[in-house]
Image (spheres, rainbow, N blue to C red):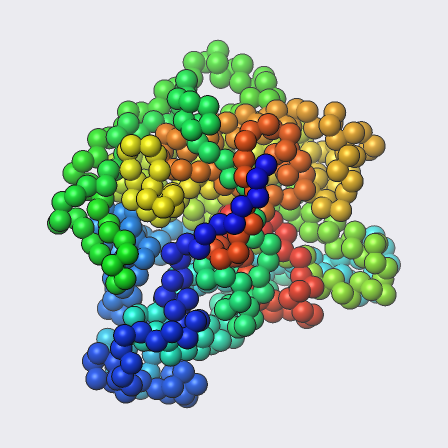
């Protein structure tokens, strides 16, 4: 196992320029259209939702940064519009924001900075005041969170502090934004619990504006074709992925002249349908608790519901264990255990985005969305999606710069025998002890074998779909132990610059007192 430092990614590159204070080549106090540019602290600046024309203008500016994997700018525009109809995004769940000058007509005002927010269900466990019984020591509060993404400043407006001004405004606005959409419960008011973002410009810029950086680690595995040679069986096999062509009509150079989008849709050959296992093979797979069974759309509803039940118990256990360890007098130091709920819509947001990308790139969509091993009450499963951020190459499955990744969105251990209430992710537990005094090495043999089978399938999927890596984000202690026992070569990556999970707490207490549970890729936006 090797620990490495991950290089910075291209995300939030525009905000990085603003954060560093580096001016763009346009140093005039006037924008290209002749408007006088106010100071970033000016009351003339206002945070508003863009008009349709302004939104399209923002997408065209962000395409060179975030649309490199798609064949054309129009594909990128289509994807951004499509996401407003996907789960989470529909019914106003996806909000676009721009910072502009007050009083100017829509479609004629400058877009000084822009971002998006995505509403999600969230849950926090709080130490209950004066609780006397065990089940009264913790209060569960359900509400919403907003995830922020796509922070961007056009080149002409960089270096003037506009991104900082926008983030201060957004952080305050999201405290109450769409709070009426939170669940109405008898014992708690509707509320926004917190907001999150994933910084691609390090840990300091957003922290200065209220979003504290949380653990940023992932475990990386190579695809099967690199680690084990060609797979003898693959559930998916796009034979001829989108190549990096050379036709000038499909080439697009971004503002920094640092990336060329040369994807050529005319050179895509549609892959065959995946083979179907025989009935006998299917029965054998079901009988073996160590054999991974693929997950498709139809299995997700039951698994997400089970995951949510387990996570609720986990949040209660986290707060209760801290109170027991620190004493009631010190319990106030534990503000909350917080989580974004891994419900069906949260997973479908990622999978339908993946569908759009793979359809435009390969001409078809995947059928394998994860895998499960074991039986209810004693099983492990993972849900994944293929993320494409750079041009897909045919030669060795690597994208330029290695941006394309099979992300394991969520890993769940369902273990009724575990004393932790099923989830089994106690970071404070002795790694040599399992539930009920059984040594972990003996107790988890079947789970480790099942997880190994799941990871092997993920590696085959990564190779077949031309991603350069499989990643598991921030694995909790129980999952980390299973990973260590799988015997599959991997790297542990401590991220310092890219995809830094960051949270702004809207409840009582300090953000540093909040424990972010299930800080995994499914929560990313």
Q: Hey, which quadrant is residue 372 in on the image?
A: top right
Count every numbered label the image shows and give the total: 0
Residue that extends furthest to the top in the rendered view of this protein: 280
Q: Hey, which quadrant is residue 297 in on the image?
A: top left
Q: In the rendered view, would you say 469 is above or below 108? A: above
Q: Quick one: quadrant of the N terminus?
A: top right
Q: Is residue 523 left or right of residue 42?
A: right
**Residue at left offset 67%, top offset 36%:** 481
**Residue at left offset 70%, top offset 39%:** 424
Residue 238: in sight, yes or no? yes
Q: Please provide percent x and percent y for residue 295.
A: 48, 31
Q: In the rendered view, would you say 232 is above or below 10? A: above
> Which residue occupies the foreground of this view, 198 or 296?
198
**Residue at left offset 73%, top offset 27%:** 441
> Which residue occupies the foreground of this view, 239 or 176?
239
Q: Please provide percent x and percent y for residue 356.
A: 32, 44
**Residue at left offset 61%, top offset 22%:** 289
Q: Please provide percent x and percent y for residue 100.
A: 34, 79
Q: In the rendered view, would you say 5 is above or below 329? A: above
Q: Is residue 36 left or right of residue 179?
A: left
Q: Hey, which quadrant is residue 288 in on the image?
A: top right
Q: Quick one: quadrant of the C terminus?
A: bottom left
Q: Is residue 387 left or right of residue 265?
A: right
Q: Please provide percent x and percent y for residue 174.
A: 50, 70
Residue 97: in sight, yes or no? no
Q: Is residue 515 left or right of residue 167?
A: right
């Amino acid at each position: 196992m090797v620990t490495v430092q991950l290089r910075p990614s291209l995300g939030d590159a525009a905000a990085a320029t603003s954060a560093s204070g580096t001016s763009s080549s346009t140093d005039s106090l006037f924008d290209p259209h002749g408007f006088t540019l106010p100071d970033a602290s000016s009351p003339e600046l206002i945070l508003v939702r863009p008009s349709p024309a302004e939104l399209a203008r923002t997408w065209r500016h962000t395409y060179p940064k975030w649309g490199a994997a798609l064949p054309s700018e129009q594909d990128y525009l289509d994807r951004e519009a499509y996401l407003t109809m996907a789960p989470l995004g529909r019914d106003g769940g996806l909000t676009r924001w721009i910072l502009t000058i007050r009083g100017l007509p829509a479609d004629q005002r400058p877009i000084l900075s822009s971002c998006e927010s995505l509403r999600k269900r969230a849950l926090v466990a709080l130490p209950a005041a004066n609780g006397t019984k065990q089940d009264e020591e913790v209060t569960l509060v359900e509400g919403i969170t907003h995830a922020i993404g796509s922070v961007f400043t056009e080149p002409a407006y960089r270096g003037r502090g506009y991104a900082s001004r926008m983030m201060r405004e957004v952080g305050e606005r999201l405290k109450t934004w769409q709070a009426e959409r939170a669940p109405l419960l008898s014992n708690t008011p509707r509320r926004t619990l917190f907001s999150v973002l994933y910084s691609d410009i390090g840990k300091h810029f957003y922290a200065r504006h209220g979003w504290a950086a949380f653990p940023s680690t992932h475990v990386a595995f190579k695809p099967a074709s690199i680690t084990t040679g060609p797979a003898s069986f693959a559930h998916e096999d796009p034979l001829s992925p989108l190549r990096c062509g050379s036709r000038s009509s499909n080439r697009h150079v971004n503002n920094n002249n640092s990336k060329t989008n040369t994807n050529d849709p005319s050179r895509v050959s549609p892959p065959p349908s995946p083979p179907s296992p025989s009935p006998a093979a299917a029965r054998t797979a079901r009988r073996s608790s160590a054999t991974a069974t693929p997950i498709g759309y139809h299995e997700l509803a039951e698994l997400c519901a089970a995951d949510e039940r387990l996570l609720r118990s986990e949040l209660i256990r986290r707060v209760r264990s801290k109170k027991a360890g620190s004493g009631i007098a010190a319990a106030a130091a534990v503000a909350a255990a917080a989580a974004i709920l891994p419900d069906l819509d949260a997973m479908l947001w990622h999978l339908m985005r993946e569908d759009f990308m793979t359809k435009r790139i390969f001409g078809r969509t995947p059928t394998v969305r994860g895998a499960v091993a074991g039986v209810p009450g004693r099983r492990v499963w993972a849900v994944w999606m293929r993320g494409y951020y750079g041009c897909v190459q045919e030669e060795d499955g690597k994208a330029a710069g290695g941006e394309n990744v099979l992300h394991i969105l969520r890993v769940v251990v369902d273990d009724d025998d575990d004393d932790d209430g099923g989830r089994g992710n106690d970071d404070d537990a002795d790694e040599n002890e399992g539930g009920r005094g059984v040594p972990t090495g003996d107790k988890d043999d079947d789970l480790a074998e099942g997880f190994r089978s799941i990871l092997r399938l993920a590696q085959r999927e990564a190779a077949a779909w031309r991603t350069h890596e499989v990643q598991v984000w921030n694995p909790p202690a129980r999952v980390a132990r299973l990973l260590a026992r799988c015997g599959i070569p991997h790297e542990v990556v401590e991220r310092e610059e890219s995809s830094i999970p960051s949270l702004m707490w809207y409840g009582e207490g300090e953000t540093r007192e909040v424990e972010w549970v299930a800080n995994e890729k499914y929560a990313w936006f």
